Amino acid sequence: MMVEELDSRKKRILQAIIQEHIISASPIGSRTLAKKYNLDVSPATIRNEMADLEDLGYLEQPHTSAGRIPSDKGYRYYVDQLISRKKNEVPGIIENVENLYQDLQDVQDIISGMAKMLSNMTHYTAMVSEPKSQVSRLKKVEIMQLADNSLLLVLVTDTGMVNNKIINLDQSLSTAKISYLNKFLSEKLENKLLANLDSSYLKEVEKELLARVDLSVDLFKQFYNEFEGAFEPGGVKVYLGGTSYILEQPEFNDLEKVKKMLKLLDQEEMLNKIINSISGSDLEIKIGQENEVEDIKNCSLVVATYYISERAVGKIGVIGPTRMEYPRVISSVDVISDILSKLISKASG
Amino acid sequence: MMVEELDSRKKRILQAIIQEHIISASPIGSRTLAKKYNLDVSPATIRNEMADLEDLGYLEQPHTSAGRIPSDKGYRYYVDQLISRKKNEVPGIIENVENLYQDLQDVQDIISGMAKMLSNMTHYTAMVSEPKSQVSRLKKVEIMQLADNSLLLVLVTDTGMVNNKIINLDQSLSTAKISYLNKFLSEKLENKLLANLDSSYLKEVEKELLARVDLSVDLFKQFYNEFEGAFEPGGVKVYLGGTSYILEQPEFNDLEKVKKMLKLLDQEEMLNKIINSISGSDLEIKIGQENEVEDIKNCSLVVATYYISERAVGKIGVIGPTRMEYPRVISSVDVISDILSKLISKASG
DNA sequence: TGTTAGCACTCTCCTTAATCGAGTGCTAAA
DNA sequence: TTTAGCACTCGATTAAGGAGAGTGCTAACA
């Protein structure tokens, strides 16, 4: 799609229409525009310009004799050319939020807290993905005895994610065996990239282990399952905040649309697809049709990457109608992603 | 409220009206009734009976010249007198579900799996509360070293709930100290009822500990916080399944109602209040106004208790409109609560 | 040549009115 | 006690008629 250079009056008019539409959610006419924004030209002139902007693809007309609404291309131009992406629109907020959340040390708590925070700030639905496992290292693996034939397997990554699973056996293990097992697994698995702890590697470890010590094969199989399940690439959990905010958007006052959207947000895999289809850039905006997932082609996403000690590990963002308050949302996502990075880096120490 | 004994024809008519209303969701007239159910009397007779049933409070009329709909009292009579509460309406399902979920060993996974299962079976929203902490004993407490000044505290109850928290210190602890700490905490805390591990007891333990070994006070405070947070009475998590099913109910085709309901289901405390306001009986049904929570006085609940080794630990149930398919829902809740008890008893060893 | 006023035209939205139909309550007869 | 008949009620649906906002076009103007 061509991106023409617009003259300054067209820019002003386009900007005015978008800003007005973001507020009112309805088509904007030339008269309204002339009244509310002092563009120093008559409605008739504005009409001509609007017709031009429509020809260029920046505006759309729902029907003859209605005002214009911005097209995806119009929003794209607005986001790229007409607003400044300044951080920190609300001064002092960083310190406040950081203080508010500073005693949270559990990574999951931090993530879901930031999801809530972001949705409260923007009044759109927020989504945050867990730190992805591929780039994490296993920091600690340990087996604890709970009862005679019941163990607890604890896995901790250097991104602060803790995974645990109770394992029931049909035999009991001696304390000596358990401590041997711990030493062995610790040596073989800790400090390795999770991406490398795949099935072939685990099979090797299993073989070596069974050669050295007499253990039920069943036990290892359960470890194995836990590894697969806990850290599979697609299985990153996505936290949501403010799901019910979508109900407040006028574009969702059709019950069918609400239903579709809520069903979508219920599907973890879909959320994964949505948030992972965003490329690696620092702050990415996807407007309407630009989205790959079919069901959100009438939505916009504003997504930032967050970091643990300078390593990109996850995404945090906002989903809402294309008619989104981009400036406010962008600066919020920007700020909150920074805070998230700080908190989570600290917590995973 | 009086409960009269109804003659058999009134019973038949009331039952027919309720069953028809459950299907159609709209007021039922005498003509429809005479046609669909062979009651061997004319519409006029049915009209008289309906007028009687209305006087007795079992039916309501939305407006003159509309059919009748059941009142809460009508549903109550239906549930108590007109349907048989037979378990196991769908034979074979128990085995199927048990097989399907038998490799789940994580209590949380089992709970959320059962919530999904129940909602799929009933097409209403399902809710399951975590095993409550008051009746659980602490089975295992253990501190693991993750890094120089970072520890992981793991708490396991005999109900299979696992809680963990990363604790960052400003000093590092020697291995010896950690193992002493583990032994000490193990002695003092394990096998105690969580209800007894309250702040006064913890303070005592702290005092004793500090007398014996040189430790930062800060460390114990963090343990303390974790205990409070992890097992406070009101803080039992409630798992939901099939939230979007409420959108399919015609009584919720008003956007305002949907909004209210979804907001309600977003509030954990509210869910707690709802599910904990159900008394201890095995399978309890709350119809409309019978509910204590204001916002669900147009809903019905069907809630059962589930058990871990014969100890009542949590609730599992369904929430839907008062016009609910009680027979199907009751047997589903019944069956699934049994399965949940079995799975969770097995998993928590 | 760009800008503006004027005007006929279009299309949605809201209100009002008319009609339909399901259902009731009452009366009187079987 | 039951039933047929009938007038009546009231919500839901459809139709019609503005009102209002906005457009595009034409012609005049600077």
Image (tube, coloured by chain):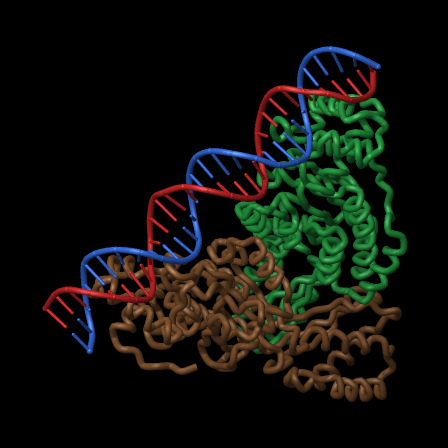
Chain colours: A brown, B green, C blue, D red
Q: How many marks?
A: 0
Q: Position of residue A349 (x, y in %)?
A: 53, 75
Q: Residue at x 51, y 56 (%)?
A: A252
Q: Foreground: B337 or B170? A: B337
Q: Residue at x 53, y 60 (%)?
A: A241
Q: Position of residue B48 (x, y in %)?
A: 74, 21
Q: Foreground: B134 or A56? A: A56
Q: Foreground: A333 or B42? A: B42
Left or right relative to B273: residue A10 = left
Left or right relative to A38: residue B341 = right
Q: Residue B95, relative to residue C30: is it above or below?
A: below
Q: Quadrant of the N terminus of chain A?
A: bottom left
Q: Position of residue B249 (x, y in %)?
A: 65, 47
Left or right relative to B178: residue A145 = right
Query: What is the quadrant of residue A219 in the picture?
Result: bottom right
Q: Residue B159, relative to residue B89: is it above or below?
A: below
Q: Is residue A3 visible?
A: yes
Q: Foreground: A61 or A169? A: A61
Q: Residue B2, relative to residue A53: is it above or below?
A: above
Q: Is residue A86 visible?
A: no
Q: Position of residue A345 (x, y in %)?
A: 50, 75
Q: Residue at x 36, y 65 (%)?
A: A18
Query: What is the quadrant of residue A294 in the picture?
Result: bottom right
